Image (spheres, helix red, strand yellow):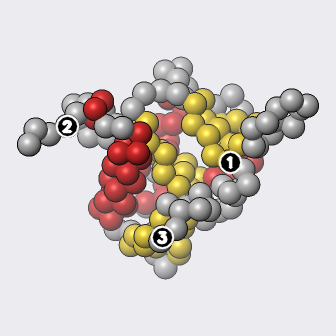
Amino acid sequence: MKKRKISELNKLQVGRFGEYATKMEFTLYGCDVYISEVDDKAIDFIIRKDGQYYDIQVKTYRKLSYVFLQKHVFTLRNNVFLALVFLHEDKAPDFYLIPSTVWEHPDEVFVSRDYDQEGQKSKAEWGINLSKKNLPRLEGYRFENSDFFE
């Protein structure tokens, strides 16, 4: 059987690939990974590092776009992180670990959208505007650059 290209994966496969790859990346950084049976609270898995537990939500992408997490399930706490994964066709994925607390002070990259105007029907969300212009802002959150693993 021929190995599939990243571009040939459907959306569900992309998400699963990102979650599994992120679990393995955390393992390589010395964390214990605990898998949740149900993913209904915006938590894909839990990790333990140095006796502390952290909730991890994974979002996986193949191209730059807008990433969002609904506020009613992705809460801003010191132990909640977004693991952002960029898949590439011919190289290893890029992994970013973003603390939920960055949204305490939204800006042009890490945004807060409440959709509370009349006629707006979307649920309130935290978002990341991913573009070539904004990618440098993520560099400090790369797994290999993150203070989290020190």
Sequence-earlier tag: 3 or 1:
3
Task: Look at label 1 and name its amino acid.
Answer: Gln
Q: Badge 3 is on which residue?
A: 36
| Residue 80 x, y percent position in the rendering | 60, 60
Q: Closer to us: mark 1 or mark 2?
A: 2
Task: Look at label 3 and name its amino acid.
Answer: Ser
Of the 4 image quadrants, the one containing the C terminus is: bottom left
- Location of residue 103 (image quadrant): top right
Residue visible at 43% across and 60% down? Answer: 149
Tell me: residue 137, above or below residue 30.
above
The residue most toward the left is 1
Residue visible at 69% across and 28% down? Answer: 108
- Which mark, by number, is residue 97? none
Q: Can residue 145 be seen here?
A: no
Report how far apart the C-alphas of labels 3 and 2 lie in the structure: 28 Å
| Residue 22 x, y percent position in the rendering | 37, 54
- Location of residue 112 (image quadrant): top right
Q: Badge 1 is on which residue?
A: 70
- Badge 2: residue crowd in 10 Å (few <14, some 14–19, many ≥20): few
Question: Tag 2, which secondary structure?
Answer: loop
Tell me: residue 33, above or below residue 81.
below
Of the 4 image quadrants, the one containing the N terminus is: top left
Question: Tag 1, which secondary structure?
Answer: strand
Residue visible at 43% across and 70% down? Answer: 35
User: Does the CB distance between marks 3 and 2 fall below 8 Å?
Assistant: no
Q: Badge 2 is on which residue?
A: 4
